[in-house]
Each structure stands twice: as structure tokens, then as C-alpha cells.
Amino acid sequence: MKEKTDTINYSDYAWYWCLEGMDHVKQMELLDPLKLCFCGAEQCRPRHRFGPAEREHFLIHVVLSGKGIYRRDKQEYHLKKGQAFLIRPGEEVFYRADPEDPWAYAWMGFQGYKANSVLEEMGFKDGAYVIDLDDPKQIGDEITNILKYKEESYANDLGRKSVFYSFLAAMVCENEKKKEKNVEKSGDELRRMYVRRATEYIVSYYDKKIRISDIAGEIGLNRSYLTNIFKKEMNMSPQDFLITFRLQKAAQLLRNTSESVRNIAYSTGYDDSLSFAKAFKQKYSMTPSAYRAAAPKDVEENEGISTTYCNV
């Protein structure tokens, strides 16, 4: 079915609909920041194709289901549900539905001097012509909503503009969510790096009189922040990690050497054998001497320390 007003053409079939002619009012580009030109949706038939040809406007297709290919400038993209591809005005392109699983897509064509900046906010920058979408159905619904305003009237013109800007906002929002995820991921990686550096410092200097504030200062953090991120990654505070590591090293020396308890205490960062014996008994429920007598030499001690960051 085709409907036509003085300016707007509307086509509506079982597999295809399109609203076009909305760029009939020719304005100077400098006065036209963003302008909707046409939009539509189609369940393509197998091998349905466009081009090679050029478009006059910026055009975004959102793949709602199925698969297809898109070619531009000797590059070929194999696209599927959840992706969107961009066609820029004056660029020769070709796209075709898959022969076995033809795509369904919705599109929005527009122009204006702010188009490039908005496209960059969507993620179409640095040579990107294809982006991934978390919620392609929502984007497709934004385009379909424009059918509420297919008749020619001042109110419907405002309605179409509202839907158009809502579509742009939804696309930009998709990209902003990705940025937030990337920042969060980058933040996680940074926290893991700090924790790794802290554990490496402890492994290297556990036999010295080190404090957690020393470790934090070494890696450029304050003590409370280091403690918080360390607990999240290691399920223990850096102080507990330091104590556990020292005692595990002490247990290893007790099992495999004949060094005196006093010397082992000093070599694992304790000021005296009394404080060492107290800490050791609290962890192992026996004195260092009793542990030496009871533990076989080939027992490996790794309890309480994750080997993600260091090998004990």
C-alpha cells in the first residue's frame, strides 16, 4: 500500500515500510544542524541487494535479525543481528542479504552540519563503519515509532523530529554505555596492577621492617585505598597478606633448615622470637619448635595466599 500527501510518501507492505520525502523543504546546510530525510524497515528476501551505488544522505541500518554483507572502499563486512552499519553521502557502497538467512533491518537517513559529530558520539569514528549494539530491538522500535506521525501536519512534523532525536539519543546512549564498561574494565585492570605491585613488594621485602604505608607510598596510593582494593582482589588485607606470607616462609624454613627459631624470626621480618612465636602459634596452633618436630620436610605451604599474584 502506498500513501502520498503533498510532500511525504509512505509505503507499507507485509515485508517493507518506508517513510520518505521529509527533506522536501530545502534548507541551507549551515542552518540545518540535523534533519530527518527518510526511514523504514524491511524483511529482505534472500540475496536482496543494493548497489553498487551512492547515497545522498547519511544512512544508518540496524540489523534486527538474519545476516548480510556490506562493502565499501574494498572492505567487506559480514554483519548479523545486533550490528549497525553506516553509509556516508557520496560513497559507493554495496550490501546484500544472506541467501539462507536474509537479514531484516531498519534504517534512518538524515543530513545536517552536526551529523558527523553525532555519528562520532555513536561510535562511528576513526574509520569505523560498523558498530555493535546491546539492544537492537530498542533501536528498531525507535524507528518504527515514527509511523505514529506519518500524516502531514505541523504536530506530526514535531512528532517525527521527536522520534528522530530519540533514535539519535538511543544510539549515543549505546556507545556511552560501552565507554562506561571500558572505563570500568580499565579501572579493574588498574586495581589489579596495583595489587600485583603490592604483593610483589611484600614478596621482595617481607624480611625487612616494612609497613603498609611504605607499600602504598611505593606504588603511589594512600593506605586506605590500597587496603580497600587489596581486600577486593585477595579477600584479605595487605597486612594479613604480609603476616601470612612471613609465617609461611618461616614454616618453610622450620621444615627444611636447622636454623634457630630466633634466626628464622629475624629473617622473616620479626624483631624478636617472642612476637614471632606468638604469631606463629596463632596461625598454626602450635609453637615453632613443635611444628618443626611434626611437619615433614616435603610439605608445601600455600594456604591463605592466592598464587594469582605471586608464587610462594
Image (cartoon, rainbow, N blue to C red):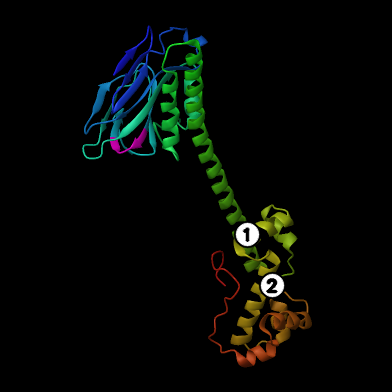
Residue 145, percent across and down?
Answer: 44, 26
Location of residue 270 by image quarter: bottom right
For residue 211, side relative to residue 70 (left or right): right
* Quadrant of the frame with the C terminus: bottom right
Nearest to the observer: residue 40 or residue 204? 40
Residue 168, percent across and down?
Answer: 49, 26
Amino acid tagged 2: Ile
Location of residue 42 by image quarter: top left
In percent of the image, x 54 and y 81: which residue is there?
300
| Span of residues in magenta | 63-68
Decide if residue 260 is in sight here: no
Mark toward the viewer: 1 or 2:
1
| Mark earlier in primary sequence (1, 2) | 1
Residue 196, percent across and down?
Answer: 59, 60
Image disc number at residue 243? 2
For residue 86, side relative to residue 76 (left or right): right
Q: Residues within 10 Å of mark 2 (few under 14, many from 20)?
A: many
Amino acid tagged 1: Lys
For residue 111, side relative to residue 15 (left or right): right
Image disc number at residue 232? 1
Examine the rendered structure and indicate whether residue 280 appears above or below residue 54: below
| CA distance separating discs 1 and 2 | 18 Å
